[in-house]
Structures are given as C-alpha cells and as structure tokens.
Amino acid sequence: MIRQRAKAGFVGRRAQLTLFTENLAKDPFSEEAPADFLFHVRGVGGVGKSTLLRQWQEAARRADAVTAVVDENDVHGVQQALVELVRQLEARGGPCKEFGKAVEQSRREQAAQAEPFPVEGEASVSSRVMTQAALGAASLIPGAGFVTAMANPEAAAQGLDRLRSASRSRSQRRGGRDDETGLSRAFVTELERLCRRQRWVVLFFDTWEQTAHYLDGWLLRLLDEEFGPVPANVVIVLAGRDDLAERDWAPLRAHVVDVPLEVFTEAETRALLASRSVTEPAVVDAVLQLSMGLPLLVELLSLARPNTVEDLDAGGDFADVAVERFVQWITDPKKREAVRACALPLQLNEDVFDAAAGPEAEGLWEWLCGQPFVSGRGDYKHYHAVVRASMVHQQRAHSPQGWASAHTRLADVHAAWRGSVEERLPEAKRWEEAEWRRHRVDGTYHRLCAYPGAYLTAALEQVVHAAGQSVAVLRQWIEAFDQAARDTTDPALLSWAGRLQSALTSDDPVLACLGVLLSHGGLSADGRSWASTYRGNHLYFRDREEEALAELDRAIAQNARNATAWSRRGEVHRWLGNYDQAVAAFTTALELKPTDAWSLTLRGETHQQAGRYDQAVADLTAALELDPTSAWAFSVRGISHRQAGHYDRAVADLTTALEHDPTLIWARSHLGDTHRQAGRYDQAIAEYTTALEHDPTYAWALAGRGEAHHLAGRYDQAVADLTAALEHDPALAWAHASRGRAHHQAGRYDQAVADLTTALEHDPALAWAHATRGQAHHQAGRHDQAIADLTAALELDPAYAWAHATRVQVQRQAGRRDAAWRDLERAVEAHPEDVSCTFERLMFEAVEGRLQSSAEQWIQLLSSQSDPTDTETSFLNLLRTLFIETENRVPEATEELLAAYQGRGDLADVLSYVVELAALTDEPGDRARQCRSLIMEHDPDIGRP
C-alpha cells in the first residue's frame, strides 16, 4: 500500500519524466527528428535515481515497450547481466531461443576449458592416413606434387600435425571475451527479434557506479555495433553517482542525454510533504533543514508523520536521524524489529526474511516488500544502500553482542542451506551452482561481520577459491568482503578490502588478486597451495607455460597431496609435448585421487598424443566407467580409435559423444575427419555441414569440409570452403596448405605457390610443403625455383625419397640430362627400395630409348601396386598400353584416364611424362604422341604455365 501511495503521489522530477515520455512518443526511425537512444541519470546516493528509473520504466511500458533493468545486486559480470536482462525481456517478449542456445553453448565451452587440445609431436596415425590419402603415399600416380610414390609419408604426416597443432590456437583453451562475444551477438539477435514486434525495447542499468567496472567496456562495444547492428528502437538508460569516463565515452558524448538529478528544491520538498499531510510550518522547516532536500530522506521523514519539531531531533547524522525517525514511526513492535533485523542480510527473499526476523514476523514479508526503501526484481529484494548503512551502523553501535549473535545465526542458516544443496551436488560441481555460491558467500559475509579478526584468514581462503572460478565469481566474493569491511569498520578488513578492490581493477584481476592473497602470511599451507594452483592454471590459459609450471611446483611444495596441482602440472607438460612428464604427473594425481575421471581422461589423451593408443583407450575406458555420460571422454576415445586406424570404433564413440551432447561441434568435426580419412567423403561433408549449422563461423569444420571436397576431386568447392575458413581464422595454417594443394591439383600454380608459402611462413620446417611448392614451380615452368624448393626439402629430410625422385624429374624435363642422371644415381643409391626412384630410373631409360632392356622391370613395377584406386588404375593401364601391351589401346586407356583425373594439375603431371615419351621414334613414341593429342584435344590449355 505504501509503495502504491508513493507511486500515486510521485512529486518532483516532472521535467525528467516528461523528457523521457516525450522521447518515447517520437518515431525511432525518423531521419529528421530521431528519438534519443542513450540517457545517463546521475546524482548522489538517495537523490532518487532508482525511483526515477522505476517511473521511466512504467512510462516505457505504457508506450508499448519491453523493458529490463539490472543493478549491482543482480549481476557480477557481463554474462550474468545478459542472462538477467533476457530473463526479464522474455517475461513480456516471449522466449529468446537463440540466446538460450548461446548460453548453453557458452556453459559447455566453459566446462570444456580444462579439456585437452592436440599438440605437436610424433605424427599421429590420423595424419599418416591423411598423408597416404591426400599425398599419394606408396603409389606411382603423378599429380599435384604428391605424386609418384610418397616413400616417406611420416615426414609429411608430422608436418601436418605441426600445422594443425599450431593452428589450434591456445586461445581455444580459455573462454572470457570470446564467450562474451558469442553471447552478445545472440543478445543483439534477440533485440532485433523483439524490436520487430515491439515499438520500443528499453534497457535500464542502475547503480552504474558499481556495474560499470565490468559493463562499461561491453556497452561501448555494443553501441559500436561490434556484436551486430543495434536496432534504432532500442533505448539504453544508465543511472549512477559518477560522470561517465570522459576518455572512453568522448566519441558518444554528443549522443548521451545527460540527466543530472539535484536534491529537491524547497518547492518540491514542500509539495511532497504536503502530499503526505505534513503541513505544520515549523515541522516543514525542520524537515527542509534536516533532509537537505535529499528525496529519500524527505520521503522517510514525511512517512514518519511528525507533528512537532521535537519529533525531529536533529542530533547526529542527518541520514541516521531520518531513518531512526521512520523506524520509530512504525508503531507495531514486530514490524519495527523486522525492519531492523532484515537490514543485516545482503539480500532478502522470504526464506532469508524468516531466518532474520524470526517467527514473530510471520506474515510480514509482503508488508516489508512494500516499504519505500526496499526494491529488487525476481527472487531477491534489498534495502536502499543509504537506509541499510544507517540501520547497520545503529545496530552495531547499540548492541555489539546482539550484532555478533544475529550474524552468527544467519551464517549458520546459510551453512545449513548450503549443506542441503551439497547433498545433491558432487563436490566438483559445487562452485558451478549459483545457489551454492550464494549461500557460501552470504555465510562468509555474516561470519566476517560477527568475528572479523577470527574469521579473516578463513574468508581470505574463500576468496582464493573464488579466484579459481572466474572474474565474476571473484568479484562477487570481493564485494561481499568489502561490504563486511564497511559494515564492521574493522581496520584489518578495510585494509584487505582496499587491496583486493584495487587488484580487481587491474588488467588481470585473477592473477593480481591471487598475488595479493599469497602475501597474507596467515594463509594455511593448503590455502597457499590452492592459490598457487589457481595462479598456475590461470597462467597456463594465458599461454605462459613456464611460469605456470613454476607456480604449480610451488603449489606442490606447499602441499604434495594436492591432486589438482599435480593434474594441472600434467596438463601443462602435455601441452608442451613433455608426454612422459605429463603421464607421471597424472599418475601421481590418480594415486592421490583414484576416482578422478578428469585426470584419467587427460592421461589417456597424453598416451594418444604419444602414439600409445592401447594405453590411451584403456585410460579413457576407465574414465568412462567412472563417468559413463562424459561426452568428452567418448570423444577423445573416438579420436584415439581414429588415429589408430579403427574407423568404425571411432565413429561409434564419436556418435555416442554427440548423443550425450549434440552441441559438441568439435566432436562432430572429428566425426567428419574420421569419415574423410576412411574415404567416405560424402558422409564427412554431411557431418561438417551439421557442425556448421551450429556455428557457421567454425573455421575447423569449414577447412575439414574443404579438404573432403579436395580429396573427392571437387577442387573449386574445396577452395571455396578453405577460403571461407581462412576468412574466419587467417592463422589456420594447415588450411593454407590444403588450399595450396587444391589449387595445385586444379592447375592454378601461382595460387598454389602463394598458399604454400604462407603455410611455410608458419612452419619453415615442413619438408613436404617445400617439395610440393617445388612441384608447382616446375609445372609453372620455373625450374630453378622448383629445384631450390626440392633441395630445401631434402636438406630438411634427407630420407625424403619422393622429393629426390621429383628433383630428378624436374632436371630431366628441363633438359639437364647430365645433372639429372647424377642425381638419379644418388637417389637410387640412397633409396634402393623406393618405387618413386625406381619409376624415375625406368622413365629415364625409356626416354633415352632403352625401353626394351627394362621391359621386365616395368612389368614387375606395374604389377606391384596393391589395391589401386580408380585414378591409380587408369594411370597403370596407360603405362601398360604405352610400354607392354602389343595391342594399341591408347584411345581407351586415355579416355579412362581423362575420366578418372579431375584436376588439371594432376593431368598436367601425367602429360609431362607423355610429352617426354612422344619424342621417341619407335612404337612407344607413336602411342605417346597419340595419347598427347587426345589429352590436348580434351583440354588445349593443359600443361601451360
């Protein structure tokens, strides 16, 4: 009733209310007189900012607007703010499904931050298989720089692993700003949807002096349309005590409608008092003097219904006097005590009200919510800061023992509630649960208020664990700590609160706060161990691995039984490729905590990356016995099966992982990899496409789909997908390499060289990329550059037989017969069993006119190829027709070859051999000339640089 009367008797601020109402009457899409979209209400505490915002919100709703409001009591970070805004927008605007999906995806990604990512090291079987499929291992097939036998595919496989691991930036290990970006884009999408259906969407941000610490930068990015175009009918209202930061807000200053709120004028004060039937001149003058025109105090004093000046004892702080006079006006002692008791909790719901006020206050919850100094949305209410500070001060001064007892009782109640939550939550999940955190932080606050000196160390250790969660959770704990310091005025708490608040504003608040906490000599050895563990983990996520290891070593030195520190140490070593050290650390962690499925999964991942697939599968299977629903463990085991070449098992595990979590797009991409490496290109493309439906910007899936198209001979589609991948992630080095291969096989040699050069800039040690670029230069007619690249490949990998054989080919076809022959002798001597070198030796003899003497060797070589593909079969058949068969089947063999070869680059390499043979004057020469004519008739530009 009181709140309804206050609303009905709203006095003052008429100009501000009119300003906002008239703005809502404008056309938001007008170019001549557009509506304002950004308001900043500012003024001292108690001046009526929140009250004005409530009036503006009511006005907005009358103007057919959907509204939402957040303040410091709702949120402690960007994600929480967005979630709360959307919760309120949904109440009137309907479900925000896209944002819900983004929140769920962000939650899953945050939960997966600890999961391992591939790192470079020994070539995986997946890369070996991919090398065989894409680079033409152990075959005679010319084409695109991977042709003729790849007798040393291991070097290429290791190179692919290096490119892939380098491409998977370690920024993928952490969330943070990337999480905010995804959620913010989804938020803007929902704003667009709402704005199509509603005249206005108005977003209110109260207590901006507090929330700006974490929302100011985000809001500037939003207004700069970094997350997408903000609709013209969105209005944003900020309310706080301070001016906007001039440096940050200068570009938008012309668009900000500044609404400074001053204390009430004498006329406004008299009007409000008159509306409350306070008209005695002496009393009115006393209220004017005591309240100093501050609207909150005028309101409280007017509600006290003073009849004489004596009712307004001006002794003491004017706010304390106003609040105390209001409380004394409450004639019912139960209500009066309830108001005082409920000032102690940080936030109120009906359960907290019952615990604070006791059974005597039964039935008074709704009455309390109607008081003018109580506000809040959703499940929780809170006192106005000015009123609460006054009541807290008076209670602590009036009865220190009663103060301590009340806070202890509330701390015990929160501990009991927290215990109830813990009954349904595993220990590892507690910090993720908002309800658990609320009871934990409120309990910490109340114990600090009751016994600041005795509980200081325990409270600081709670802040240590909060820092290990996220900046938002850390902020929640520090704000509670700071509130306890201000409410108790304890010097030690005030000193610590100041240091922690200062650290919270640093560039890296987690690292800074943990550093401050470690400076507290009173922390227990376990607390110091945890602080160093969290610092080490944080440094790891910031790509500072050596510092992370040093910090984790300190954690273990403080407490050698800290299983988490051992496990995190193992993870850093795993990322660095120190697999034996990683396994040792994970093993120690598991000795301390045998049921730790996380460490089991990580040790399995480490075995997999070290090439120990049986041990990997054993650990991952054990992890799944502990947690049969772990999509992560199923995914990693599926990857292990794939890398061992067990594609059906890999598909089964990855499919199960996706059944448990359909949004795991990286697992779906791995499923696409599995189908691609098994040669099932259409199924691979289907999986990549499904992943891209969840996230169209997922560069890895785009690149994988491009590679599948490439292997299927669809080079233009391959280039399109790989180009899209690189637009989203220009540093995806292996996509440059894959696109270079596609360009090469399509006969676009200059583009191939450009892409392969970019890949080599990322990793100059890639021998196969040097060799492939050399082949591209050769086919473009740049023989010296081709030889230089092939020589560089051999310097990096002297056992690279294919590069050696290709250099022989380049020199021979460039007319450098003597150099080619000397190189061939060295190649055959170095690689006597290599089929590519054998092929080049026989080809050399053929073009020199010594075909008859090597006929038996040709028959043996051509019959040695097992399980050839259609492309391989067509080339082998052509060689048989040219060299061995008596019947001239050149037209049929050439037609078969042209049908099988999809890429101009592949065909150009075949043609280069045919052209050499066409120079002969015997029967093979005639057949070669016939074949050349048919190929040139098919594509007159084939073979041209």
Image: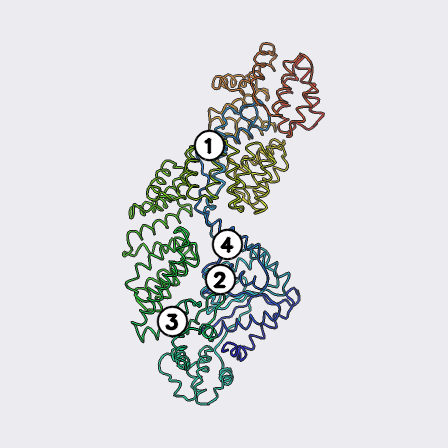
Which is nearer the N-term, disc 4 or disc 2? 4
Side (left or right) of 543 relative to 880: left
138 versus 264 height, above or below: above
Give 642 or 877, whichever is nearer the viewer: 642
Instruction: Give the x, y percent position of residue 615.
Output: 41, 34
Q: Which residue is mark 2?
A: 247
Which is nearer the N-term, disc 1 or disc 3? 1
Q: Residues within 10 Å of mark 1 (few under 14, many from 20)?
A: many
Which is nearer the N-term, disc 2 or disc 3? 2
The amino acid beneath tag 2 is Arg
777 versus 498 height, above or below: above
Q: Are marks 2 and 3 in contact (CB under 8 Å)?
A: no
Which is nearer the N-term, disc 1 or disc 4? 1
Instruction: Tell me the SS state at disc 1.
Output: loop
436 versus 728 height, above or below: below
Q: Which residue is mark 3?
A: 358
The amino acid beneath tag 4 is Glu
859 versus 552 height, above or below: above
Question: Which residue does the image show at 28% across and 54% down from the upper left?
Answer: 524
Q: Which residue is mark 4?
A: 180
Q: Are marks 4 and 3 in contact (CB under 8 Å)?
A: no
- The dot on residue 123 is 1
Q: CA distance from mark 4 to mark 2?
A: 23 Å
Which is nearer the N-term, disc 4 or disc 3? 4
Q: CA distance from mark 2 to mark 1?
A: 51 Å
Q: Nearer the viewer, mark 4 or mark 3?
A: 3
Q: CA distance from mark 1 to mark 3?
A: 68 Å
Residue lying at the far right in this picture: please name it.
937
